[in-house]
Amino acid sequence: MRSWFEQFVAEKRSPAGSPGRDLVALLERVQSACKAIATLAGQGSLGRTARHELGINVQGEEQTLLDVLANNAIIGCCEESGLLCGMVSEEMEEPYRIPAWCRRGPYLLVFDPLDGSSNIDVDMSVGTIFSILRAPDGITEPALEDFLQPGTSQVAAGYALYGPATMMVMTAGAGVQGFTLDRESGTFVLTHKDLRIPEAAREFAINASNQRFWEPPVKQYIGECLEGAAGPRGTDFNMRWVASLVAEVHRILVRGGVFLYPRDSKDPSKPGRLRLIYEANPMAMIVEQAGGLASTGRHRILEIVPQGLHQRVPVMLGARLEVERLLRYHAAFDRGEDMMFEAPLFHNRSLFRSN
């Protein structure tokens, strides 16, 4: 039986042609790591890893044993491949150096080993996000700056979703394909071919508890959605929030919608909440390859030149028409057109008023 990526290569070619053998082999290594992580995550409390907290990681967030095990699974599966010359992870402050005894390769791997790990103890979906970059020519020991490439430089990106079924969704620049793990055979089977996001949406995902910290353009947009059929949008919207970027993006790919983790004033030192290199960029590539848009509200995410490994950015991605609307609202606000924000949403009352 052909592997999941061999199936992909047989049916899809990027504008530059079929992915090279090295890239195929590297993606197979990532897939093997994700199988191992799926097993760990699927053990839940039986594995005695979910609630085992180790302290605070480099992001200032609580780190669990499962975070570390997932990180180690990817390193272990990929460092000896001879396909990489460096790796960067959310769980590591500095780039990971490939051991001296390993052959070097042409790629850099960037990843979030366990997105949404706070969901583990309540048995909700988590995932892994990855991005592959090409190392600069002649580089065998990459420095930090070698990883600071804009998202447009990605040669492939994807995620694994560990839910009721384990899925791999990826792109190599020629559309987005989804594969489901057949647990009996241990192989990924192509189940979601050429995923496309509808241009409009009737679902949005946002953490409404941060409403008081949002910028006016976001308040305007969410307020109109909440007005439903009686408001200016003339249709009812559903709100979703899973606290896992992988789960949010996967829902959008399968049935449409828009996801927002916008800039807010809760912590002025952080212009955004999601990390550019190993969260926003790979998801932006996937979403755009599926016909959607990904923006900070003011800039295309894929065109941002990173200033640091753990740089954070605002993220708004999903249905093209909805993201375009958000862009118009931000542009109008930045021009000082305050009158468009005089809707009742911004009067001194609760966002969730009673009728």
Image (tube, rainbow, N blue to C red):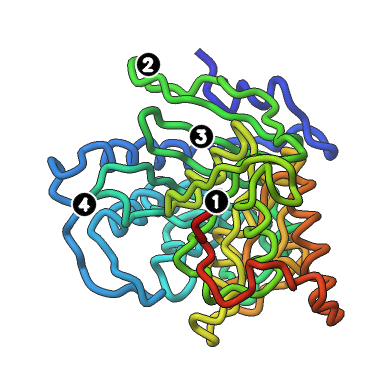
The Cα–Cα distance between marks 2 and 1, rounded to whole angstroms, is 35 Å
The Cα–Cα distance between marks 4 and 1, rounded to whole angstroms, is 25 Å
- Mark 4 highlights which residue? 50
Three-letter code, disc 1:
Ala
Three-letter code, disc 4:
Ala
Specify whether 186 is left or right of 89. left
The Cα–Cα distance between marks 4 and 3, rounded to whole angstroms, is 22 Å
- Mark 3 highlights which residue? 168
Within the image, what quadrant is residue 175 found in? top right
Q: Earlier in the sequence, mark 1 or mark 3?
A: 3
Other residues around mark 4 within 10 Å, as few (<14) / some (14–19) / many (≥20): many
Between tags 2 and 3, which lies in front?
A: 3
Q: Position of residue 270 (x, y in %)?
A: 54, 81
Q: Position of residue 45 (x, y in %)?
A: 15, 44
- Which residue is painted at 23% across and 50% down in the image? 121
Q: Which mark is residue 205?
A: 1
Specify whether 56 is left or right of 28. left
- Mark 2 highlights which residue? 185
Q: Earlier in the sequence, mark 4 or mark 2?
A: 4
